[in-house]
Image (cartoon, helix red, strand yellow):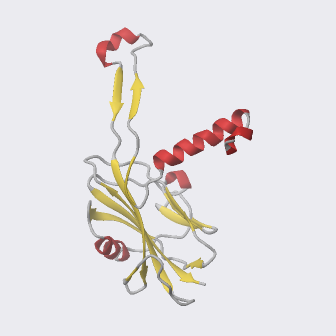
């Protein structure tokens, strides 16, 4: 029996919607592709006014979402690396927009594990790198920018609340737009506990 079988009414619809949203919006490390969307249109609720153009398809965009870790000196950390307590680690999260149009209203959230303590005043963002740039080049570009305030507000693109570093207006920050053929990056520093 499915785990969803015991959920009834509106709760089932809500849970189902969340599952669908997660599957179509989560971008795995590497490349991800959302499903194409199709809609039916009309003019003044008269379907015939659009003739054969009532149905249109919006092609999904190819995006890439990556999270990487670096030592404070910029040395990349590989998956499974072990570092001593007290080590400062910089987390880099970036979205590579390989399309020829801007991606508006990006929202990113990263909940920190209890093993990491955020270091105040270290959130930085950048969108100066062209699509396909290496993680090292993206890291260098965003690391060279000025830090934002830590506050979650409409003033900066990113902030932290509790243990969640977030960016974008859906998270309470300013709007984030990823320019066409560009990489948008978020960088912040934590201490290993």
Q: Nearer the viewer, residue 45 or 63?
A: 63
78 is higher (above) or lower (below) than 38 = below
**Could you say where residue 6 lies in the image, as x and y percent from the top left?**
74, 40
Q: Is residue 1 left or right of residue 128?
A: right
Q: Residue at 47% across / 82% down in the picture?
A: 81
| Mark count | 0
Residue 118, position in %: x, y? 56, 76
Position of 90 relative to 106 (above/below): below
Q: Is residue 152 above or below residue 47?
A: below
Q: Quadrant of the N terminus?
A: top right
Query: Could you tell me residue 111's position as x and y percent?
Result: 58, 65
Residue 182 % position (x, y):
28, 58
Q: Give above or below for 106 relative to 124.
A: above
Q: Quadrant of residue 172?
A: bottom right
Q: Nearer the viewer, residue 128 or 9?
A: 9
**Residue that sits furthest to the front in the current view:** 1
Residue at point 36% right, 22% down? 55
Residue at the (36%, 9%) spot, across then down: 48
Q: Quadrant of residue 137?
A: bottom left
* Screen quadrant of the C terminus: bottom right
């Amino acid at each position: 029996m499915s785990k969803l079988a015991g959920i009834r009414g509106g709760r089932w619809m809500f849970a189902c919607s969340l599952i669908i949203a997660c599957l179509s919006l989560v971008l795995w490390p590497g490349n991800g592709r959302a499903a194409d969307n199709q809609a039916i249109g009309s003019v003044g609720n008269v379907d015939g006014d659009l003739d054969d153009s009532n149905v249109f398809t919006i092609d999904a965009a190819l995006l890439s979402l990556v999270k990487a870790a670096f030592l404070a000196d910029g040395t990349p950390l590989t998956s499974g690396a072990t570092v001593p307590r007290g080590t400062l680690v910089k987390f880099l999260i970036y979205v590579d927009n390989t399309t020829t149009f801007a991606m508006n209203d990006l929202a990113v959230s990263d909940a920190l594990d209890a093993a990491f303590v955020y270091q105040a005043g270290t959130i930085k963002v950048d969108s100066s790198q062209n699509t396909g740039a290496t993680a090292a080049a993206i890291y260098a570009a965003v690391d060279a920018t000025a830090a934002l305030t830590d506050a979650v507000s409409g003033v900066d693109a990113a902030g932290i609340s509790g243990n969640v570093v977030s960016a974008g207006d859906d998270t309470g920050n300013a709007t984030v737009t990823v320019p066409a053929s560009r990489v948008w990056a978020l960088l912040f520093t934590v201490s290993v506990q």
